[in-house]
């Protein structure tokens, strides 16, 4: 059903730093304590553009927000919106936290990945992939989950494959994050 995507689909997580951060976050979720250092490290993995704002978050605020976001009772929209209450965290960075939380259910939204889906007419709004909202993320998530199910991979592998394909098309250097 998605032969275009299947052509460039990755089958293994290529980013060792993602795997390392995912393990660290998993440990902090188990311990119910979220360090500011790991928060900043994950934010930097996604993008360094808002690091000054992200540093303004207190450890206490990070703990409250992370505990709420990773509550098993919350759905996708509530989780994203909760993470976006942290200073300097917009939908793309929030999606990185969710993907590290559960890469079998989530993927990182990125303008590169969005642009590929837009060119394929899988998403129809915001061709630039900029200023993506929670609603856009839910749309994106539904699409990459459907693709992942169809191709028997995780949403994370779909998102990183889309990102790398767009970078290839645009002739950009490869980034390890999405």
Image (cartoon, rainbow, N blue to C red):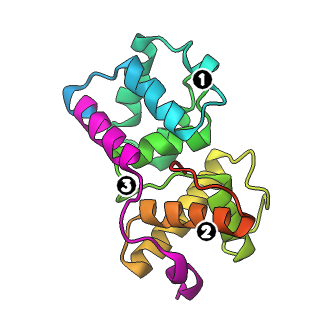
The answer to whether residue 72 is visible is no
Label 3 sits on a secondary structure element that is loop
**Residue 50: x %, y % from top left:** 64, 26
Q: Main secondary structure of the magenta part?
A: helix
Question: Residue furthest toward the left?
Answer: 31
Which residue, given by chain and number where applicable, does mark 3 sit on? 103
User: In the figure, 165 relative to 130: above or below?
Assistant: below
Q: Residue at x 55, y 36 (%)?
A: 81
Query: Which of the two residues, 13 or 69, is positioned nearer the viewer here?
Result: 13
The quarter holding residue 129 reads bottom right
Which residue, given by chain and number where applicable, does mark 2 sit on? 165
Give the magenta part as a residue range: 1-28
Which residue, given by chain and number where applicable, does mark 1 sit on? 51
**Residue 61: x %, y % from top left:** 45, 15
Q: Residue at x 40, y 20 (%)?
A: 37
127 left or right of 156 in image:
right
Tag on residue 150?
none
- In terms of sequence position, does the residue under pointer 1 or pointer 2 come before the other? 1
* Pointer 3 with pointer 1, Cβ within 8 A: no
């Amino acid at each position: 059903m998605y032969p275009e995507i299947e052509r460039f689909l990755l089958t293994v997580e290529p980013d060792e730093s993602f795997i390392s951060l995912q393990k660290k976050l998993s440990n902090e979720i188990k311990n119910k304590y979220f360090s500011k250092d790991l928060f900043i490290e994950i934010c930097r993995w996604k993008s360094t553009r808002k690091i000054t704002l992200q540093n303004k978050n207190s450890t206490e605020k990070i703990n409250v927000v992370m505990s709420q976001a990773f509550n098993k009772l919350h759905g996708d929209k509530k989780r994203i919106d909760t993470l976006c209450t942290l200073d300097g965290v917009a939908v793309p960075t929030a999606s990185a936290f969710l993907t590290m939380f559960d890469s079998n259910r989530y993927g990182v939204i990125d303008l590169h990945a969005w642009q590929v889906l837009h060119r394929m007419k899988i998403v129809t709004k915001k061709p630039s992939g900029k200023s993506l909202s929670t609603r856009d993320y839910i749309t994106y998530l539904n699409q990459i989950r459907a693709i992942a199910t169809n191709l028997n991979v995780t949403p994370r592998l779909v998102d990183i494959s889309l990102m790398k394909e767009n970078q290839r098309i645009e002739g950009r250097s490869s980034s390890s994050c999405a």
